[in-house]
Amino acid sequence: MRIISGTLKGRVLTPPKSFTAHPTTDYAKEGLFNMLENSLDLSSVGVLDLFSGSGNIAFEFASRGCPSIVCVEMDPAHARYISKTAEALGVADRVRVVRNNVFDFLNICTSRFHVVFADPPYDLPGLELLPEKIMQAGILEEGLIVLEHPGQFSFTNTPGFQKTRKYGHVHFSFFALSKTLPTFALPTK
């Protein structure tokens, strides 16, 4: 697992082998960030990374200039790893870790974000309802939700659904909450 681009390009992330999280593959991450950088100015967006796992996605956002990333991770070992890695990479001032259950966090969060990335466990009960729960939480500031999920889920009837992209076995579904949808126009393929 490595950081693909930006100021930390090439840095390798090595979480302990005991971690149970399924990290986003480099191939999928590269495709996702190519798409995001063509649609957004990452140097001006606030990001919420739900189910952060190893912090892989958060560190990619930080490397590409994102000024504020909040990682929500329930597992204490994972949260510690993200914090220690943020320190080691010199981005602790921009990457904040909240150790909490994602659903509890969504109920109490008062901050707003431009991009919400969620990579829940693939066997999470109610995973299909997650995009709506995020939208209902009022944390998205006219922006984008990116949900990583297994292929058996279809979100075409979910409010705000824009597109699903597949990179190997990884699927990303995009949801927009914006009055200016062209800002988040996604390339067709």
Image (cartoon, rainbow, N blue to C red):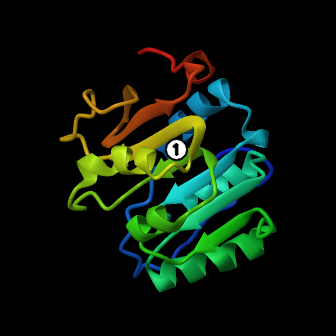
Spot occupied by residue 128 in the image (x, y as percentages of width and height): 25, 47
Relative image position of residue 39 (x, y in whole percent)? 63, 25
162 relative to 23, above or below: above
Q: Is residue 51 visible?
A: no
Assign the C terminus to one quadrant of the image: top left
* Rendering quarter of residue 102: bottom left
Q: Quadrant of residue 91?
A: bottom right
Element at label 1: helix
Instruction: Estimate the x, y position of residue 113 in percent, counting from the top left.
Output: 62, 48
Front-lying residue, 111 or 30: 111
Q: Looking at the figure, which quarter contains the N terminus?
A: bottom right
Determine crowd level at label 1: few under 14, some 14-19, many 20+ residues with C-alpha closer than 10 A: many
Query: Toward the viewer: 12 or 132?
Result: 132
Between residues 135 and 67, which one lies in front from this camera angle?
135
* Point 30% across, 42% down: residue: 169
Q: Which residue is mark 1?
A: 29
Identify the residue at horizontal 51%, vertical 48% (top origin).
Answer: 138
